[in-house]
Image (spheres, grey):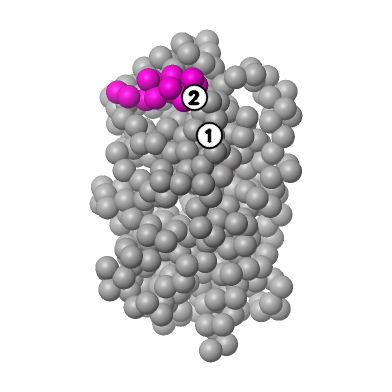
Amino acid sequence: MISHVLGARPNFVKAAPVIAALSGTGRGQRVIHTGQHYDERMSEVFFRDLGLPEPDVNLEVGSGSHAAQTAAIMVALEKEFIERSPELVMVYGDVNSTIAAALVAAKLRIPVAHVEAGLRSFDMTMPEEVNRRLVDQLSDLCLVTSPEAVGHLAAEGVAVERIHFVGNPMIDTLLAHLDRFDTGAVRRAYDLPERYVVATLHRPANVDDPEVAAGLVKRLHEIAELVDVVMPVHPRGRRVLTEAGLDAHPRVRLLEPLGYVEFVAAVRGAAAVVTDSGGVQEETTILGVPCLTLRPNTERPITITHGTNRLVTADDVVPAVAEALAAGRGEGDRPPLWDGHAGPRIARVVEGWLDG
Ligand code: UD1
Ligand code: UDP
């Protein structure tokens, strides 16, 4: 039996095509939700939107400091893995649920497969970079979404037999649901104007420090002088951004976090996106929507070389939005193997490895 460990919003989007592809193999699967994300808008809505099977168990760990949250997930998962003895644990992305599961499985001598291995921002101030590096060292199968990740893993001493370039399951999900992303419907549902920019912010470096957050709010207000700004607010930044007066501008529209289908529909119809999300950099690459990423680096450089992504600072985000509005939507090249078939490729690698 294969146990999938999911905890946070992006995990659900990445796991859906993998679970679907493996369900065709007849092998038993168990979906474990750690409870890292728990609001209906951060969790359940994704299970509904993506047709994911209900979790077999929810460990309900909730929020906490990095140590408290990671430790709570580890303690609960150790019990779960001992009781169920999975033949493989599959982990996704770079969140605390990912490292907690990999560490527990490795100590119990249960093999680990990491989906989205090898991405590197080379910025150890990001908690995700710490998680990624450690998870890859602990993984028996490193399932890679982007060619440069192979080189990163090899440089860190990961044996080549463990590395498999399989493509991007997050893009499988996007392509599988393309017909459902109805921008008109989302415009009507939220009373959005014809032309708007979507903004999302949740990185600790942008939203944890009230001074930094207030600086970004000022920039978002300047953008709102050019174009309406629609912002589904992640719970992490909600208090700080609201206290900094984010909703004080009449052309800034704050929304609850959107479900997957509504969110991608909103992005699909946007004139541009301003974000610090990892997944959104990839989705805009495929949708051809200009993406301005408010970060000094990205672990997804292929979205710049092949896609519509550009890194910006707080100081250059406003002119960058103005340029994007003037230039209009672009067509990037599709990165290799971002073709909607990563889930089946992952299932074949996993099956082959388990049978071999
Ligand atoms: C986590 C991931 C991050 C990922 C993001 C996706 C880690 C270290 N970080 O960040 O890599 O990009 O998920 O969205 O794993 N909260 C709620 N309701 C929820 C969940 C969280 O209100 O359902 C609030 C809590 O106040 C919590 C805070 O958000 O303390 C942060 O949640 P947490 O899961 O620790 O990290 P994220 O910022 O969501
Ligand atoms: N997303 C969503 N609703 C929102 C914001 C994001 O459905 O309000 C989706 C987005 O399309 C992507 C995933 O959530 O598939 C990315 O999650 P997030 O930005 O929280 O995490 P990251 O990718 O930065 O780890």
Above or below, 55 against 208 in this view is below
Task: Specify the segment rendered in magenta.
Answer: 315-327
- Horizontal side, residue 7 vs residue 163: left or right: right
Q: Write down the residue under mark 1.
A: 330
* Residue 53 pos. (x, y %): 69, 60
User: Does the segment drawn in magenta span residue 50?
Assistant: no
User: Does the segment drawn in magenta span residue 325?
Assistant: yes
Q: Residue at x 33, y 21 (%)?
A: 214
Can residue 240 be seen by looking at this rendering? yes
Q: Residue at x 74, y 29 (%)?
A: 185
Q: Residue 138, located in which quarter of the rendered image?
A: bottom left
Tell me the distance, in whole angstroms, between the alpha carbons under discs 2 and 1.
Answer: 8 Å
* Residue 299 pos. (x, y %): 36, 50
Mark 1 neighbour density, 10 Å: few (under 14) some (14–19) many (20 or more): some
Contact flag, marks 2 and 1 (Cβ < 8 Å): yes
Above or below, 318 against 233 in this view is above
Judging depth in this view, the residue of 252 and 144 nearest the camera is 144
* Residue 328 pos. (x, y %): 53, 26
Above or below, 270 against 253 in this view is below
Q: Residue at x 39, y 36 (%)?
A: 310
Q: Secondary structure at mark 1?
A: loop
Above or below, 251 against 139 in this view is above
Residue placed furthest toward the bottom: 356
Can residue 201 be seen by looking at this rendering? no
Q: Write down the residue under mark 2.
A: 327
Please tell me whether the stretch drawn in magenta is mainly helix, strand or loop. helix
Judging depth in this view, the residue of 30 and 354 nearest the camera is 354
Judging depth in this view, the residue of 87 and 26 nearest the camera is 26
Give the position of the N terminus as an image quadrant. Answer: bottom right
- Horizontal side, residue 138 vs residue 2: left or right: left
